[in-house]
Image: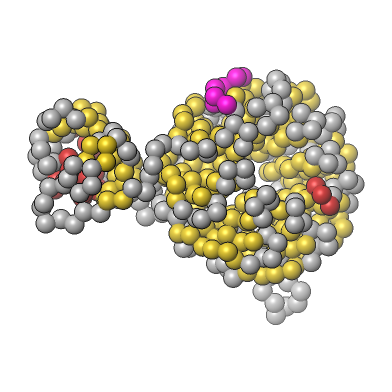
């Protein structure tokens, strides 16, 4: 076996158990079932203990004084700080790979209760975290991850967006039917405005100086002036709008509705998209895309260089590419159960997450052709792209074991660069390319994990 000093490695659970039990060892710090182990008599006993856990960290001391930390998620084990000279021969097949190099986890930062939305302002170096059950926004320093201030807002903040040009952050308070307008430089509330009933998401257009707030129950889009925070108008769209995307280069806003429609009685119902003029808020046209089971944010994504909109039609098992200037569907790609799309305009790539195959499919945003598809470790949830460094950060859950994970993939090759277990329920992820930092909100852990995208 190759000797690897001090480098993190991923091995299977039995291999790790074999190694630990290859000479007398004791557990000096452990979680869950392993907390009661004061010695490791054999690998069968140790593996059985590990198999009862989904995620844990354990500190091991070997008889020769070697110290090591093991991080277990699912059936995989990461050995940290270990010197591996060999594994005992016990008739057990051992799988060892050097898939993980170093650590890209910088720190975990406690925030308010149930963080569920994030936004970055690269101009001020601030990260805004909407804490749904605390009715607050945590303002973080993008470079260090430190919490600078905590700002009270309305009830159940669940979405946030930033206008870098006007220096304002817009926080959607779902239960208050309001939007809190914050000064991005200080994190202080400068204005609170009323919008439609149960607002669920917000996006900004920094060219037209507009913010667009979709309200699920009111079936409306509230158009705000990002310089003053004032509501300019309210526009009715389709039933239960849940997602939106903006192409500032052509002054277009796209709103995806949860309600379905069919051209005639024999057609399969499909979801409508409303196309708005970003300057006036007027609805220019409505067109049908595919069938989408549960509409959630992330199913729409724009490449503002090619002026193409990508729509994840999960139940139709395809992705549509739409001309943002006209609303015309240009191409339909056979990508099954697509659930989330992130774009990298500089690289002309769209990254499509699929649920059934746990895959990352790369699409050329100029042609709409599929470039490659890469299998990822577990069922993906969301993704964000560091277009400057060519990195994709993905949050995921293993549906079989319940383990949570954050991974980083090379955007050009699809190679898995780093992976780390997440404590609980990783949800949204955003990236600040200026500081080479990614931020992941762990909803159930009331924390934000800071990652280094430059490693």
Left or right of residue 138, residue 224 in this image: right
**Magenta-colored span:** 143-149
Colouring method of the image: secondary structure
The correct choice, above or below, for 373 with respect to 53 in the image is below
Q: Residue at x 39, y 38 (%)?
A: 102
Q: Is residue 270 above or below residue 421?
A: below
Relative height, residue 69 to residue 199 (above, below): above
- Left or right placement of residue 46 versus residue 440 in this view: left
Identified at 11% across, 51% down, the residue is 89
Residue 349 locus on image (x, y percent): 63, 56
Residue depicted at x 51% and y 55%: 413
Q: Where residue 411 sits in the image (x, y, percent)?
A: 55, 51
The quarter of the displayed image where residue 93 is located? bottom left
Residue that lies at the very extreme toward the front in this rendered image: 2
Residue 281 on image: x %, y %: 86, 48
Apparent side of residue 150 relative to residue 37 in the rendered image (left or right): right
**Residue placed most toward the observer, 198 or 75:** 75
Task: Classify residue 197 as left or right of residue 77.
Answer: right
Q: Residue drawn 79% across and 25% down?
A: 191
Q: Nearer the viewer, residue 402 or 76?
A: 76
Residue 310: x percent and y percent?
68, 59
Q: Was residue 388 drawn as part of the magenta stretch in this picture?
A: no
Image vertical order of residue 216 relative to residue 37, above or below: below
**Is residue 148 part of the magenta span, yes or no?**
yes
């Amino acid at each position: 076996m190759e000797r690897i000093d001090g480098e993190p490695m991923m091995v299977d659970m039995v291999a790790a158990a074999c190694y630990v039990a290859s000479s007398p060892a004791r557990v000096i710090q452990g979680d869950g079932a392993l907390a009661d182990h004061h010695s490791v008599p054999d690998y069968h006993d140790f593996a059985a203990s590990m198999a009862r856990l989904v995620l844990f960290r354990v500190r091991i001391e070997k008889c020769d004084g070697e110290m090591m930390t093991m991080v277990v998620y699912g059936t995989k084990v990461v050995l940290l700080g270990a010197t591996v000279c060999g594994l005992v021969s016990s008739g057990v097949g051992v799988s060892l790979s050097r898939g993980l190099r170093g650590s890209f986890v910088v720190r975990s930062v406690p925030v308010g209760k149930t963080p569920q939305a994030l936004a970055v302002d690269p101009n001020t170096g601030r990260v805004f975290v909407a804490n749904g059950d605390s009715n607050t926004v945590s303002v973080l320093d993008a470079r260090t991850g430190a919490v600078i201030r905590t700002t009270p807002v309305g009830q159940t903040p669940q979405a946030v967006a930033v206008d870098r040009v006007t220096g304002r952050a817009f926080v959607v308070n779902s239960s208050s039917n309001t939007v809190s307008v914050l000064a991005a430089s200080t994190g202080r509330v400068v204005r609170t405005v009323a919008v439609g009933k149960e607002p669920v998401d917000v996006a900004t257009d920094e060219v037209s100086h507009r913010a667009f707030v979709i309200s699920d129950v009111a079936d409306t889009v509230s158009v705000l002036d990002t310089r003053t925070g004032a509501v300019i108008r309210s526009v009715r769209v389709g039933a239960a709008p849940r997602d939106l995307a903006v192409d500032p280069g052509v002054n277009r806003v796209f709103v995806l509705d949860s309600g379905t429609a069919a051209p005639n009685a024999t057609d399969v119902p499909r979801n409508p998209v409303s196309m708005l003029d970003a300057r006036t808020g007027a609805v220019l046209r409505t067109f049908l895309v595919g069938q989408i089971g549960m509409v959630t944010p992330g199913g729409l994504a724009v490449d503002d260089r090619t002026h193409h909109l990508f729509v994840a039609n999960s139940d139709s098992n395809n992705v549509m590419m739409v001309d943002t200037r006209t609303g015309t569907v240009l191409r339909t790609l056979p990508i099954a159960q697509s659930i989330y799309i992130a774009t990298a305009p500089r690289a002309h790539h769209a990254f499509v997450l699929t649920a059934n195959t746990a895959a990352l499919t790369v699409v050329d945003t100029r042609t709409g052709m599929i470039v490659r598809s890469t299998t990822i470790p577990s069922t993906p949830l969301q993704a964000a792209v560091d277009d400057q460094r060519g990195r994709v950060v993905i949050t995921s859950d293993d549906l079989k074991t319940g383990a949570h994970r954050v991974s980083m993939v090379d955007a050009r090759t699809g190679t898995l660069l780093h992976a780390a277990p997440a404590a609980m329920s990783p949800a949204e992820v955003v990236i600040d390319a200026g500081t080479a930092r990614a931020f992941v909100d762990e909803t159930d852990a009331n924390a934000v994990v800071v990652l280094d995208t430059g490693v």
